[in-house]
Amino acid sequence: MEWWASIVGVAATWLLADSQKSADIVDKLNLLPEELANSEDPLPGALHSAYKSRRGLLSLALCKDEHSVERTSETILKVCDIAGTRLADSLAYYCCRKPTQLMMLMQVLCCDWVLEVRAGVWEASPAVRSAGGRSGTTPPAPHRHLRA
């Protein structure tokens, strides 16, 4: 139960841009508890991967050159892909069961983080930054469809 509370807590601190409080919470989220990792419910794994990709997005701002931005972006997007796949599995899992409102809210949070990370990585890409808002030169935003 503490892990779930920490997920909600870090989401709230990120939303409020309270980096000090989020730093206090993140240590509790580095590892997915064994009972959640071994659960047949894919939602904890989806949220954990989405959390890691969202945390990775914060580190993207610290990259000093294009090469490190590209490498970091690739890693973040791989973790984001895992989160998206697990979220799709979670949606399918709960299709056959009656999910609680809390579980549906956690799915929405996961989806929000996946979309936010993808948009953030796209915005941080060198091609988008160098385009500087010029029309017609910016690469298209990435599209990712959940398969449910």
Image (cartoon, rainbow, N blue to C red):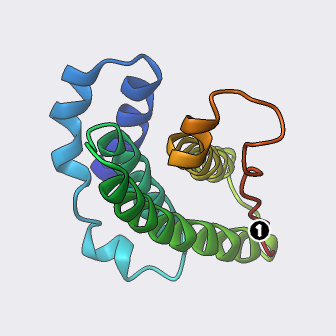
Q: How many tags in the picture? A: 1
Say above or below: 102 vs 15. Answer: below
Left or right: residue 70 compared with residue 104: left
Say above or below: 97 vs 119. Answer: below
Left or right: residue 141 compared with residue 117: right
Q: Quadrant of residue 42?
A: bottom right
Q: Nearer the viewer, residue 72 or 147?
A: 72
Asked whether the viewer can see residue 4, the reply is no
Say above or below: 37 vs 30. Answer: below
Q: Nearer the viewer, residue 16 or 72?
A: 72
Q: Which residue is mark 1?
A: 146
Q: Residue at x 74, y 29 (%)?
A: 134
Which amino acid type is marked by label 1?
Leu
Q: Nearer the viewer, residue 140 or 34?
A: 140
Q: Position of residue 127 (x, y in %)?
A: 59, 47
Q: Position of residue 45 (x, y in %)?
A: 45, 69
Q: Residue at x 23, y 43 (%)?
A: 26
Q: Position of residue 101 (x, y in %)?
A: 69, 45
Q: Nearer the viewer, residue 75 or 53?
A: 75
Indicate the secondary structure of the residue bearing disc 1: loop
Say above or below: 84 vs 136. Answer: below
Q: Residues within 10 Å of mark 1 (few under 14, many from 20)?
A: few
Q: Residue at x 42, y 16 (%)?
A: 16
